[in-house]
Amino acid sequence: MASWLNDLSAQFKLNFIDKDRWRLLLNGLGNTLLISLFAVLIGILIAVVVALVRTTWSNNASRMRPGFRKGLLHFFDRLCGLYITVIRGTPTVIQLMIMYYIVFASSSDGVMIAIVAFGINSGAYVAEIIRGGILSIEKGQMEAGRSLGLNYAQTMLYIIAPQVLKNVLPALANEFIVLIKETSIAGYVAVPDLTYAGNRIRGITYSAFMPLIAVALIYLVIVLVLTRLVGILERRLRQSDGRTS
């Protein structure tokens, strides 16, 4: 038992203490959180536009007169549908490599490229979440807004959007959790994220157990904390629903 503990202590010292290798994990964790945060913000911005285009077309196509505006909206609806199909139908790692080796081949900022790649990827999934949230609102809400003299955009902004936001917040928070785990493939293009840091330590020390277990535990702690926060958010939303009802 004592020899096992001594060996474990020696492995810990070798992988994390010697030459301050723990800093690699710390820097990698910072990059992982940075990529995840900005990617989810980009994803939400893209998703809002895509979801609004698709729901506007589906809600108004039958009432619009043939002409330039209807043709333009139809074009963008098809374009948004193609974007969702392509992004959701191809592996994230391939999208990341296309961004790194083709689209931004002249750039050396791997973190920025990862943010853009994961943001575009996240946007396709978040768009469906937001679109589902919009479609979950009763059609009578839109009709009520129009009867009050609001146009379509005003009704969406002042009546529909607050309800949608409340409905999709837990799903958006869960998407952030999924995105954090997905960023572990950033190392495929040499982005120094958390997983890449663990692999780098493993390559230096030739010890796989300690660095990889440490990386797994860090991801687990992050996910558990965020899952707890999502649970608190969902409970508060249910409580507010109970008060308003």
Image (cartoon, rainbow, N blue to C red):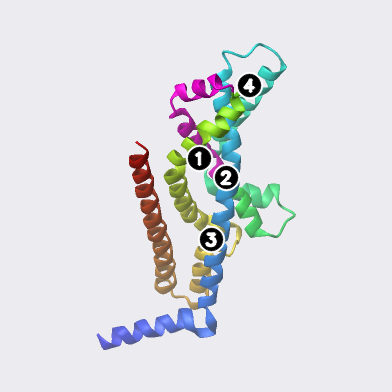
Identify whether 30 is placed above or below 68: below
Q: Earlier in the sequence, mark 2 or mark 3?
A: 3
Q: Earlier in the sequence, mark 4 or mark 1?
A: 4
- The answer to whether one can see residue 95 in this image is no
Residue type, mark 3 in image: Leu
* Residue drawn at point x = 54 percent, y = 73 percent: 24
Tell me if label 1 and label 2 are in contact, CB under 8 Å. Answer: yes
Position of the N terminus by quadrant: bottom left
- The residue under label 1 is 125
Residue 161 position within the rendered picture, expressed as x and y whole percent measured from the top left? 52, 35
Residue 123 position within the rendered picture, expressed as x and y whole percent measured from the top left? 56, 42
Bounds of the magenta span? 122-149
| Helix, strand or loop under label 1 | helix
Residue type, mark 1 in image: Tyr
Q: Real-space Cα distance between discs 4 and 2?
A: 22 Å
- The residue under label 3 is 33
How packed is label 3: few (under 14 Cα within 10 Å), some, or many (20 or more)?
A: some
| Helix, strand or loop under label 3 | helix
- The answer to whether one can see residue 36 in this image is yes
Q: Earlier in the sequence, mark 3 or mark 4?
A: 3
- The residue under label 4 is 74
Tell me if label 3 and label 4 are in contact, CB under 8 Å. Answer: no
Q: Earlier in the sequence, mark 1 or mark 2?
A: 2
Q: Real-space Cα distance between discs 1 and 3?
A: 19 Å
Identify whether 235 is placed above or below 226: above
